[in-house]
Image (cartoon, helix red, strand yellow):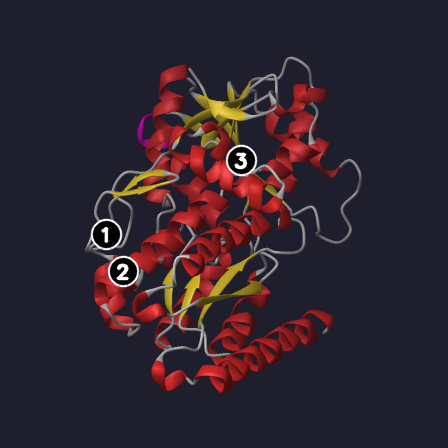
Amino acid sequence: MVAARIGLVLVVATLSLFAAAVGSGGSSDGSAPLLLGVEGPQSGEQATNGLDQLRGVRLAVSQLNAGGGVWNGRKIMVVPIDDKGDAANARRVAREAIAGGIQFVIGPYNSSVGIANLALYRRNRVLPVWMTSRDETAGAGATVQPMNSQIAPVEGAYVKQIGARRIAMLVDDTANGAFTKGMANRLRAALRRDGASVTWTSIQETSAPGLTSDYYADRVASALATRPDLVYVSTYFPEGVAIAKALTAQGSAPRCLMGLANVDTGFIAGTTSAEARRCAFSGVPAATEMPSARAYVQQYQRMFAKRPGVWGSFTYDSAAILFAAIDRAKSFEFGAVQRELRRTRDHRGATGAITIDRLTGYRTTVPVSILRVDSSKRFVIAR
């Protein structure tokens, strides 16, 4: 109930700002700010991730507005949309954003949220540059984020490279684990086709009521009882922290691969060096480790006095290709901007070169690698 009131207050505040902008310049001449929603887990367990994403967009918008705005001199106003990474909030926050006059949205991030609300945005002509990775969330708009059909082959190649034949999976397959469950299903199917044996142990979110202090240790022990030569962890980072601790406590447990949703500064903050370095990871390195993001890192640190995380560079690039599409379309109309988004070619972004597939809206080449945590507790590409 409190969350609903907070969401309503944000929408009322947005509408008030919009009305004030119209009163000062009038929307008929295009001088009112264009409302850009940024949806993600801006509070709750995954807030470090969602706030990094929000800052990435704010940096892009500050640069755009300082340079005169988007097509026709229109300035951008960022509207945070906090879904807390919970599918239960998905449709409510989307309805509030639509009622608030938002035309474009960057996000959501969690696939379970996007499955619930991206179709609602699209039906109401709000164009998304989505940050979800489940293929079920595809549709109008585009993404610079790796999709699960693009991540799974990288994981499969790693498992084959190390020769693992008995794999124990620890999977968040709860209502909010659409991405993590989907990734595990894809990898399990590929491994079984290759003749490997795979077991599956379900994992609850750390916020689930009634969890005992031994819950994750017990789940890890159950997975290890199958005597695997690889443990695959497909969870979000709060659960990944607990699993990394339990695996490290086991001492000489088998090798471990953690999925992309654990690649987050929150994982680093919640683990010791030994725990963080216990597993390899599939994903993308933090912006500080990407040569293409050098200028972005400097600008981010100057603006926010913080080191950027993993996903803010992706929302920064999402905003950049959206603004470029509006400029090329010379329009704010859903269909015109959608067409230009799909025509994005070789955009030089913080996350590298970006070309969007016209048919799917997917990025054609994604910067997904196998990562490790180095002695300075940074995600780096494994060599």
The residues colored magenta run 191-195
Q: Nearer the viewer, residue 54 or 25?
A: 25
Quadrant including the C terminus: top left
> Please, is residue 183 above or below residue 359 in the view?
above
Quadrant including the N terminus: bottom right
User: Which quadrant of the view contains residue 118?
Assistant: bottom left
Foreground tag (3 vs 2): 2
First along the sequence among labels 2 and 1:
2
Label 2 neighbour load within 10 Å: few <14, some 14-19, many 20+: many
Circle 1 residue: 344
- Are discs 2 and 1 less than 8 Å apart at CB? yes
Q: Nearer the viewer, residue 61 or 174?
A: 61
Pick out the residue farthest to the top: 252
- Are discs 3 and 1 less than 8 Å apart at CB? no
- Helix, strand or loop at mark 1: loop
Foreground tag (3 vs 1): 1
Pick out the residue farthest to the right: 213
Label 3 neighbour load within 10 Å: few <14, some 14-19, many 20+: many
Q: Name which residue lies at 31% across and 72% down.
A: 332
First along the sequence among labels 3 and 2:
3
Tell me residue 289's x, y (percent): 47, 28
First along the sequence among labels 3 and 1:
3
Tag shown at residue 263 = 3
